[in-house]
Amino acid sequence: MYDETLPTVEQLEVDELVCWRVHTRHGELLMTQQGAQVLSYQPHGEEPVIWLSGQAAYQKGKAVRGGVPVCWPWFGDLRRNPAEIQGMHQGGPICPAHGLVRERDWTLLGIDSEGPAVRLDFALDTASEPLPGWPHAAELKLSILMDEQLRLTLSTRNTGDRPLAISQALHSYFAVSDIQGVEVEGLDDCRYIETLEDWQERKQKGPVSFRGETDRIYLETPRRMAIVDRAWKRRILLEADGSASAVVWNPWIDKSRRLSQFAEDAWKGMLCIETARVMDDFLVLRPGEEQRMVLNISSTPL
Ligand code: TA6
């Protein structure tokens, strides 16, 4: 007799990409080998927690819009990174936004079920699979554990003989009822960089609410922050370890028109909160050193 409480993992092809659909008694997850990218995550009986664009393209070498792209070995525009990180790049013009690994296939190390939970482990070894313009040896791993929550652990080990300077982010797209009615709790009194106003430094007062394009880098962030969504009567809780910076982004109306794989009104239903190591919170790894960044995502009723 089939025991429906046991998890199921199905490997499938979505257009050009190898994907896995994981179904457990808690919810459903879809992820792809390209970029070891979580694409969607929905607890049973709830609205999706992780947002995926309705115009997502599943093509080799093109990051899928939505889910949790991994930004590494730099976040954002390389030229806006600290000099130590810029110095790690020794290539010519090849320096795409958000680094070099979200458009490459990672190696599946394994899929394990632990009772009602499922864990998928991926790795990318830059010694055996060099990144263009970034001639350094590192072992990058992402572990995704789905039980009643979703836990992502991104680890970097410096397998070379010189220090590594890296900025990174789990660029999580969250699904919201309407960005105009949600708030982000937990960032009160945090310093942030207002990238839309000449990268000036500001200080957050109270919860973050949204009345226009928002693209802020918060610094000295606490372990816990939450998206409060009164219309969907839920709070999405983010708990981070090994990260003291976070990016809060919504493109709003005008920027949405310039984004690929993004419907004109998609800005209303999504919000990025990106658990990061950026700006003065970037990673420095001695030879042989490993550092981890953990993000635990859960949703609770309001
Ligand atoms: O994390 C915020 C951000 O840097 C925005 O400025 C916007 O560019 C977004 O990332 C999406 O970047 P992408 O390269 O995925 O289109």
Image (spheres, rainbow, N blue to C red):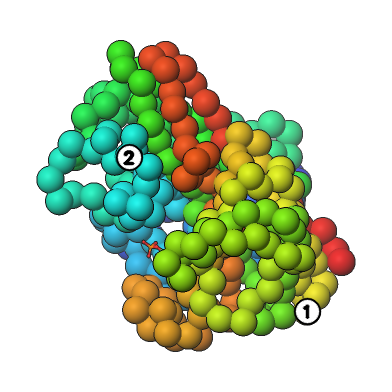
Quadrant of the image occupied by residue 60? bottom left
**Considering only vertical position in the picture, is 57 above or below 213?**
above
Disc 2 C-beta below 8 A from ligand 1: no
Q: Is 166 left, or right, of 40 in this rendering?
A: left
What residue is at 50 percent from the left and 30 percent from the top? 155
Q: Can residue 96 be seen in this view?
A: yes
Q: Can residue 2 be seen in this view?
A: no
Q: Nearer the viewer, residue 34 or 254?
A: 254
Measure the C-alpha gap from mark 2 to mark 1: 43 Å
For label 2, the SS is helix
| Residue 3 locus on image (x, y percent) | 74, 44
Q: Nearer the viewer, residue 124 or 148?
A: 124
The image quadrant where one finds the N terminus is: top right
Q: Is 176 left, or right, of 169 in this rendering?
A: right
Q: Of label 2 and label 1, which has the lower sequence position?
A: 2
What residue is at 27 percent from the left and 54 percent from the top? 96
